[in-house]
């Protein structure tokens, strides 16, 4: 597929460049371009697009154009669309415009639609001598998925053997017809008829039992593979870096994940059935040739026309399926977001507007379904016509062969043979068309594998350092000459920042909103990798120690932290398998939450929703704090973790934390919180400025959970 559909909310520009590259024969698709030029979460503007185009070996030329001039531009070119989007103009013909929209796929637009969307800015792209048809990016290997499936060869072999026996019965059935018509009816042998019918009844029973066994085995295999594969993909997904999730819509990630099931179905059940279909088609074809060559020729011609028809319609089917996946993902993401944003929607009275936009998205999905249904209808009628004509032709030719039996040069052909031929022909055409269907599904599987590749090929943030206890290292955090920006096209948030937070000290980080405090904290926690410089824990780079090992030593409450649905106790111990109830209570006391909890009817067993429903803002923050303390961390990192608390509670918590003598880094705006720290550092224009000198503190002590 040449048109590259965007996966991330803000990568329409990159997707357009990938589409133009593909149309001009560039080997890179969006997956590999995304890896080479990670887009900013905020999108890409024209000048950044031009930079990337130049790096791809395309000479960019921005142009102002009227609708009438579009046909004179060098196509394909990129058009600025509705002020916040880019599309690719592929062709202009007789006043209609073929546009590749990375959000929805190919669209043929009228002049009026073009005039409503096109802002007048176009980007022409001409390949230079540097433009190379590069080797395709590493593709998602379905073979790897197959290899990961335990017990697959044995289960497939069993299913195959049972199925082959079943197919044997299917081959014998038409022979019964031939025997009954040619021998029994002609000779009037009633006894032979009884024997034949009894024999075939037995066969039918056996066939039913084996059919049942085969279906059951296919179901069991499907279930087991689906579990293995989805588990593998989920394990991969959950280890992807944070920015993977921040850049994508929820619905898109969920839909990509669902592609695993589609791939699994084609690779296992589909593959076994295709193998059998191929085998049966070959056997039936051999038998048909034995009965009559001219009749077989007619059937083969019909199957060939059918195959050609599928080949011709394949592109349209594939595009409709690919686009449907994208628009359906958008619709489900929008739906989920609506549920999450119920409070502001009601407060701002935006229910109707939201409903209207959701309806538009549903219509988008329905339009794709309609396209597929239209194709299916046309295709169904065409194939009925092809095979109907073939049937009539076989009947006509077969009957003529029977009628010619009296002649000396006639090839022997009986009524029973015609019946048997028709039965084998029916088997052959149905198996051959199923096989062609499988080949189409196999090719169309790339729609799913491409989507799955976004998860499977994305670099994971899991390091291969084994779990290690870092108790021997002093809990000291150091940022050494760290610079950071979210992408090459984003401004620097931190520039050459060095900071050492000594063990047992408390550093308060202040700064204007948007100055980069949370970003700095995320870098210190290994959630974001510094663009330059490094982060050390206890004097050792955290990548060497293993980010997971370091995070085990650090308790955190982040700005947009989440609770999960479950009980309060479960949330405090973060669903630990063998939680310590006294520790849960100690953590809740230290976070000044215990009294609130015991006042609840079900105390620690009280259930809360995933968004912390059932708790006040301050209780939510204290619960997050209790969760952080339950870990018995050696370092505590708090990002405005007490902003919703009253002063009395905040003071009590600050005292409790001070007594623990853990290393602390606190982002806060309140003067009281900042004043309690050993050092206050302000982040301004990407650099750190000391606000008050370090206080002489006590030497660090091992962390304790002393209730306040
Ligand atoms: N994923 C992202 N991609 C691009 N820019 C981002 C991203 N996340 C944050 N930013 C930008 O980085 C800058 C620093 O953000 P950050 O959240 O670190 O600020 P902050 O100092 O913690 O702000 P606040 O006090 O309001 O929480 C802001 O300008 C923000 O818009």
Image: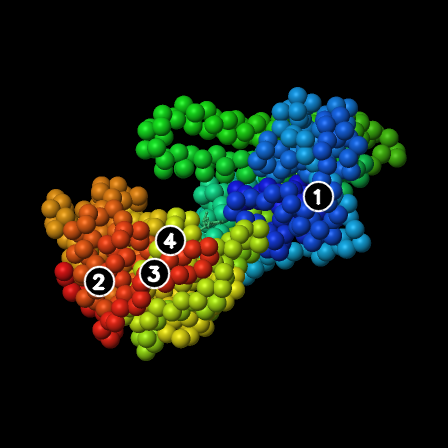
- Camera sees residue 68: yes
| Distance in Å between CA atoms under marks 1 and 3 | 52 Å
User: What's the residue at 52%, 61% (across, down)?
Assistant: 531
- Disc nearer the start of the sequence (4/1): 1
Q: Is mark 4 within 8 Å of ligand 1?
A: yes
- Disc nearer the start of the sequence (3/4): 4
Crowd class of label 2 (few under 14; some 14 to 19; many from 20; radius 10 Å): many
Q: Are marks 1 and 3 in contact (CB under 8 Å)?
A: no
User: What's the residue at 25%, 55% (across, down)?
Assistant: 673
Secondary structure beneath disc 4? loop
Rendering quarter of residue 348: top left
Extreme-top residue of the structure: 112
Above or below residue 104? Residue 220 is below
| Distance in Å between CA atoms under marks 4 and 2 | 23 Å
Secondary structure beneath disc 2? helix
Crowd class of label 4 (few under 14; some 14 to 19; many from 20; radius 10 Å): some
Q: Are marks 1 and 2 in contact (CB under 8 Å)?
A: no
| Distance in Å between CA atoms under marks 2 and 3 | 22 Å
Instruction: Please name the residue that numbered disc 2 is placed on.
Output: 657
Label number found at residue 20: 1
- Please provide percent x and percent y for residue 166: 56, 47
User: What's the residue at 57%, 51% (across, down)?
Assistant: 489
- Disc nearer the start of the sequence (1/2): 1
| Distance in Å between CA atoms under marks 1 and 2 | 57 Å
Instruction: Please name the residue that numbered disc 4 is placed on.
Output: 511
Instruction: Please name the residue that numbered disc 3 is placed on.
Output: 691
Number of labels in the image equals 4
Q: Report the mark closest to the observer, 3 or 4.
A: 3
Instruction: From the viewer's side, name the closer residue of 49 and 610.
Output: 49
Crowd class of label 1 (few under 14; some 14 to 19; many from 20; radius 10 Å): many
């Amino acid at each position: 597929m040449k048109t590259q559909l965007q996966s991330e909310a803000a990568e329409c520009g990159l997707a357009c460049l990938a589409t133009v590259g593909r149309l001009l024969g560039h080997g890179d698709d969006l997956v590999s371009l995304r890896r080479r030029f990670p887009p900013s979460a905020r999108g890409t503007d024209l000048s950044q697009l031009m930079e990337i185009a130049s790096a791809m070996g395309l000479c960019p030329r921005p142009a102002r154009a009227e609708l009438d001039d579009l046909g004179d531009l060098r196509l394909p070119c990129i058009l600025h669309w509705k002020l916040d989007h880019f599309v690719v103009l592929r062709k202009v013909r007789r006043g209609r415009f073929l546009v590749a929209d990375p959000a929805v796929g190919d669209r043929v637009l009228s002049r009026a639609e073009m005039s409503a969307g096109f802002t007048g800015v176009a980007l022409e792209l001409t390949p230079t001598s540097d433009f190379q048809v590069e080797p395709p990016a590493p593709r998602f290997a379905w073979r790897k998925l197959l290899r990961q499936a335990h017990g697959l060869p044995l289960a497939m072999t069993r299913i195959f053997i049972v199925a082959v026996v079943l197919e044997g019965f299917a081959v014998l059935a038409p022979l019964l017809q031939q025997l009954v018509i040619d021998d029994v009816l002609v000779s009037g042998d009633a006894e032979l008829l009884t024997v034949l019918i009894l024999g075939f009844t037995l066969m039918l029973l056996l066939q039913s039992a084996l059919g049942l066994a085969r279906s059951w085995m296919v179901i069991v295999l499907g279930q087991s593979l689906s579990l293995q594969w989805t588990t593998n993909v989920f394990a991969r997904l959950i280890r992807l870096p944070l920015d993977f999730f921040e850049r994508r819509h929820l619905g898109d990630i969920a839909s990509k994940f669902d592609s695993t099931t589609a791939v699994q179905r084609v690779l296992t059940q589909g593959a076994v059935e295709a193998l059998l279909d191929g085998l049966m088609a070959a056997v039936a074809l051999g038998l048909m040739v034995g009965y009559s060559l001219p009749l077989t020729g007619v059937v083969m011609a019909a199957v060939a026309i059918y195959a050609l028809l599928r080949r011709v319609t394949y592109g349209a089917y594939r595009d409709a399926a690919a686009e449907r996946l994208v628009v359906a993902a958008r619709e489900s993401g929008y739906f989920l977001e609506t549920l999450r944003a119920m409070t502001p929607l009601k407060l701002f009275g935006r229910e109707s507007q939201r409903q209207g936009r959701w309806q538009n998205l549903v219509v988008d999905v329905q339009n794709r379904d309609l396209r597929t249904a239209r194709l299916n209808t046309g295709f169904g009628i065409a194939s009925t016509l092809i095979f109907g004509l073939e049937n009539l032709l076989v009947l006509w030719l077969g009957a003529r062969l029977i009628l010619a039996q009296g002649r000396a040069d006639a090839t022997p052909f009986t009524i029973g043979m015609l019946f048997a031929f028709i039965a084998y022909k029916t088997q052959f055409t149905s198996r051959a068309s199923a096989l062609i269907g499988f080949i189409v599904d196999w090719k169309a599987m790339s729609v799913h594998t491409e989507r799955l590749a976004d998860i499977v090929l994305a670099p994971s943030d899991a390091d291969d350092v084994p779990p290690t206890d870092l108790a021997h290292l002093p809990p000291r955090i150091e940022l050494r000459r760290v610079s950071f920006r979210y992408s090459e096209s984003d401004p620097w948030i931190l520039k050459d920042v060095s900071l050492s937070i000594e063990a047992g000290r408390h550093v308060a980080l202040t700064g204007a909103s948007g100055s980069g405090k949370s970003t700095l904290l995320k870098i210190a926690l290994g959630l974001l990798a510094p663009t330059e410089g490094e982060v050390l824990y206890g004097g050792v780079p955290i990548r060497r120690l293993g980010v997971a090992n370091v995070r085990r030593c650090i308790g955190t409450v982040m700005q947009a932290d989440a609770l999960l649905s479950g009980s309060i106790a479960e949330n405090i111990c973060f669903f630990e398998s063998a939680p310590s109830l006294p520790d849960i209570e100690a953590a809740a006391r230290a976070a000044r939450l215990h009294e609130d909890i015991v006042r609840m009817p079900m105390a620690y067993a009280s259930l809360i929703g995933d968004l912390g429903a059932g708790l006040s803002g301050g209780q939510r923050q204290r619960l997050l704090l209790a969760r952080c303390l339950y870990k018995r961390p050696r370092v505590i990192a708090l990002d405005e973790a007490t902003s919703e608390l009253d002063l009395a509670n905040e003071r009590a918590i600050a005292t409790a934390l001070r007594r623990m003598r853990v290393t602390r880094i606190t982002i806060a705006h309140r003067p009281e919180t900042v004043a309690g720290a050993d050092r206050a550092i302000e982040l301004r224009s990407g650099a750190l400025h000391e606000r008050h000198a370090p206080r002489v503190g006590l030497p660090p002590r091992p962390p304790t959970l002393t209730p306040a």
